[in-house]
Image (tube, coloured by chain):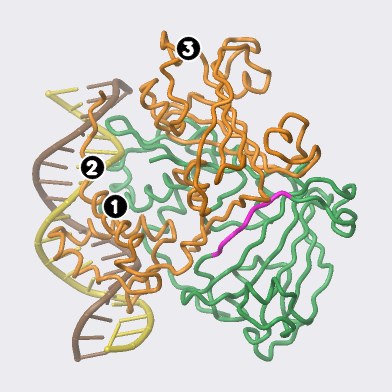
Chain colours: A green, B orange, C yellow, D brown
Amino acid sequence: MPITRSKSIAEQIDGILRHRIYDEEYPPGSRLPSESELLEEFDVSRATIRTALTKLAAEGLILRKQGDGTYVNERMGDVNTQLGGSWDYWRLIERSGFLPSIQQLSKRTRAATPMEAGALHMAAGDDVVSIKRLFKADGHPVILATNTIGCILLGDLDLADLDAELPIGQLMERFCQRPIAYAIMDIQSTAAGGDVAQLLGRKRGASLLQIRTTFYDRDNGPLVYGSSYIDDTRLSLRLMQTWG
Amino acid sequence: MPITRSKSIAEQIDGILRHRIYDEEYPPGSRLPSESELLEEFDVSRATIRTALTKLAAEGLILRKQGDGTYVNERMGDVNTQLGGSWDYWRLIERSGFLPSIQQLSKRTRAATPMEAGALHMAAGDDVVSIKRLFKADGHPVILATNTIGCILLGDLDLADLDAELPIGQLMERFCQRPIAYAIMDIQSTAAGGDVAQLLGRKRGASLLQIRTTFYDRDNGPLVYGSSYIDDTRLSLRLMQTWG
DNA sequence: AAGTGGTCTAGACCACAAG
DNA sequence: TTGTGGTCTAGACCACTTG
């Protein structure tokens, strides 16, 4: 069991406020307590309160108006994606109003494709562990995701111990002790090939969203390469862009 | 001419550091001066320096390592999109390594489609101003963008004065005095219809990225609705996702 | 005029990595 | 041990909108 670093005060306040917003203790469109009220409630300095509020505002969860107050963003419920921040397919499905589930299709060691080898800075043909999963929304297949990890990173770990239900970030932290620092994603539109179409229950040639992601550690070393197909007739990517 | 608020110290430092990174005065992968060195250089408090650095780190431009230092992210050059932050098609094309240009296809007043009316909280058939533009990369059409603005917002402005070359954010600020606070984007994959295919020089039925965006002011009032088609064989959406 | 969020300061202590 | 970035405090003044 890894030791959980106790969170900072600002992070805890962030979490508490976030919960109050989701629980509608602070309903959409309503005004939050002022910063001075909050610092009294939590008995911290104003800077700490503002650290938490700044993060919520950057995500679009709240809108701050100078001279007026801080308001819960009415339209946060429309959003299912937090590109630029932590985010995974499970939550995407959940936030789209469906019940998520995962079906593991395969988990095996094989030779890297040229694309994977390039992304992971390996030679083509080097051994990688490949995990192929199908995400379902209310039981319907919606996302086909393949993740590839260089074998060196996993050491002598038994494949059977690799928990394929975990989001990729937690998986890397637990099994490689290498937390993800950032990822680079490439979003494209593509026509479904035969196998992908069949797994997602679409016709061959149907339009799908394709997301290719390479995850890096804080030393710029590539950790994982992922390629996913999203059936966006059932699931669209909705995200908030905050201005200024 | 609207009065331009002079920027805050933190914003100015943000801009200076950003320039130094783009100019490779701080090259990719190199270590920045420490926070104490920076606060001496600019003669400000540490909190002010950290405000600037925090913003750069959130965008992925720099990586901060406790006990070590702050480094320029080597892979920032791969990225062409800043979803979740300020961003426009002109910069997308530029950052993809092409020379951008805009061709205005039409600018006129017409009745709102049901989709536009819904997004803009109007009745279907109400008057809107519609601007249709074709973005080119090195002269090749890559993005077809249609923006729709409720006529009420523009008042008695002459259509001819509306500068279609402006990014939508600056356009709203200048002609409506209503700055954009946030936007909600919907990213999907779609098959090109006849007219879209022709304008983008693709075959009918080809896969395109479609982005639908509604822009809101800080009072949650819808300002603009935009629908765009991106030819992602020439231009892919590459963005950075920062972790933690 | 009063209250809000926006900005900035000067200082302190802690956690972490290696100059 | 030294120097980094991470966190927090108490206080000040400013800009803005009108609870």
Residue positioned 76% across, 37% down in the render = B192
Residue to which mark 3 is pinned = B152
Chain that bears disc 1 = B
Q: Which residue is labeled 1 in the image?
A: B15
Rendered residue at 19%/70% (across/down): B37
Q: Nearer the viewer, residue A122 or B105?
A: B105
Determine the main secondary structure of the stretch shown in magenta.
strand
| SS for dot 3 | helix
Q: Position of residue B123 (x, y in %)?
A: 62, 12
Confirm whether circles 3 and 1 share one chain: yes
Q: Quadrant of the N terminus of chain A?
A: bottom right
> Considering the numbered disc 1 on the image, is that residue within a helix, a strand or a loop?
helix
Say which mark, if any, is on residue B93.
none
Q: Are marks 1 and 2 in contact (CB under 8 Å)?
A: yes
A223 and B139: which one is in front?
Answer: B139
| Amino acid type, mark 3 | Ile
Instruction: Please tell me which residue is depicted at 49% across the width and 47% down the height of the picture.
Output: B99
Q: Which residues are magenta?
A: A183-189
- N-term mark: 1 or 2: 2
Query: Split into 4 quadrants, where in the image is the C terminus of chain A?
Result: top left
Earlier sequence position, callout 3 versus callout 1: 1
Question: Is residue A188 part of the magenta span, yes or no?
Answer: yes
